Image (spheres, rainbow, N blue to C red):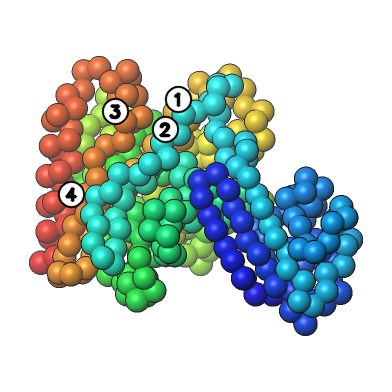
Amino acid sequence: MSVIEKHFSNQLYIVRLLVEEADDGARLDQFLMGHLSTFSREEVKRRIAANDIAVEGRDHKLKSSTRVRMDDIVKITIPRVTQEDEYWRGEKIKLIETPDILYEDRDLIVISKPAYMATHPTGKHIFNCATVYFESIHKHTVHSVHRIDRETSGVLCLAKNPQTAQFMTDLFERDKVSKGYFFIAKKNRELSTERFEARERLGPMEEGLKRIHIHAFPEDSELGKQARTVFKILYQDATYALGLAFPQTGRQHQIRVHAMTHGFPLVGDKIYLGSFKMFQRFKDGFATEEDHDLMELPRHALHAIALQCPYKGPSTLFQDSLPPDFIHWMEQKMPELKLADLKQMIKGEVENYFSKLAN
């Protein structure tokens, strides 16, 4: 197949596909799976039944078993309905869908990605995405060069052209980019306020759905992959800890697993403060009141606060501020905390850490 036209907005997705010789005679649902690869087969069938799929020139109702022919044009039109809604204690969360721009020039956009905004379209998340938002503004392809989890907020780089996308991607792949994250954690023990390192190896123990649950293994184990995170606790009381994490490697869920392993799982982390079963309950809409009480926040409390890379200079530093939901939570849960002092500590620690890397 080849794409004749593709259009994203924050409310509508339209793509027109040309059926080529290799797909002549294929079932419609099989043909669509080649393009909608992140959709399940059942979701594709639902889209066909909902008339979101058309074959131009055919007026009759389509079925999953309808055969496509060479030179047919298949049009996919998916409206935004409820597939990206998020809920907390039974109420829909008001999402931030307009990211703040931290830096922009003719080649690069650096944004403060809001929580729940995907980096780029994937699975059911095809509307509230960083690339989609800026493509609707600039009217051309905007490239993702790295990603942060949907629930994680903070610094994210996007490229405006293929050359910059390749340049930035190479920097990430060659470990030329340094990152810093702010977190809120629940304490299982008293924590050192000095910098310390987590070096447990990380990896899944099971296949299938449970592959998303990453486990920590001893540094000298043959299981998992080598991982390293530098932590700095900035403030703590009897229950919670606030700090910075500087990942030296890029393993899945690295900060969250290392934090849990060292006695301070992140607030709102449905897997590592909760469990895989709790994660599934939230995902399926069956979380209990006790689940919500344990989590305290609708999302895991991790925010990409800074990123440094050799972009138009040997060590360009992009920094973000604290997100509004974290500030509100800290004001409610930690009233004795002076936010102005915390912000100053974050700024000082981030700049000190990255300046040492630059030297």
Compared across the picture, whether 12 is left or right of 183 comes to right
Q: On the image, numbered disc 1 is attached to which residue? A: 296
Seen in the picture, residue 156 relative to 83 is either above or below; the reply is below
Callout 2 crowding tier (Cα within 10 Å): few <14, some 14–19, many ≥20 = many
Which amino acid type is marked by label 1?
Glu
> Label 2, label 4: how many angstroms apart (C-alpha)?
22 Å
Contact, CB < 8 Å: mark 2 with mark 1?
Answer: yes
Which amino acid type is marked by label 2?
Val
Callout 1 crowding tier (Cα within 10 Å): few <14, some 14–19, many ≥20 = some
> Label 2, label 1: how many angstroms apart (C-alpha)?
7 Å
Judging depth in this view, the residue of 135 and 304 nearest the camera is: 135
Contact, CB < 8 Å: mark 4 with mark 1?
Answer: no
Residue 200: image quadrant is bottom left
Q: Quadrant of the N terminus?
A: bottom right
| Element marked by disc 3 | helix
| Element marked by disc 1 | loop
Lower position in the chain sequence, tag 2 or tag 4: 2
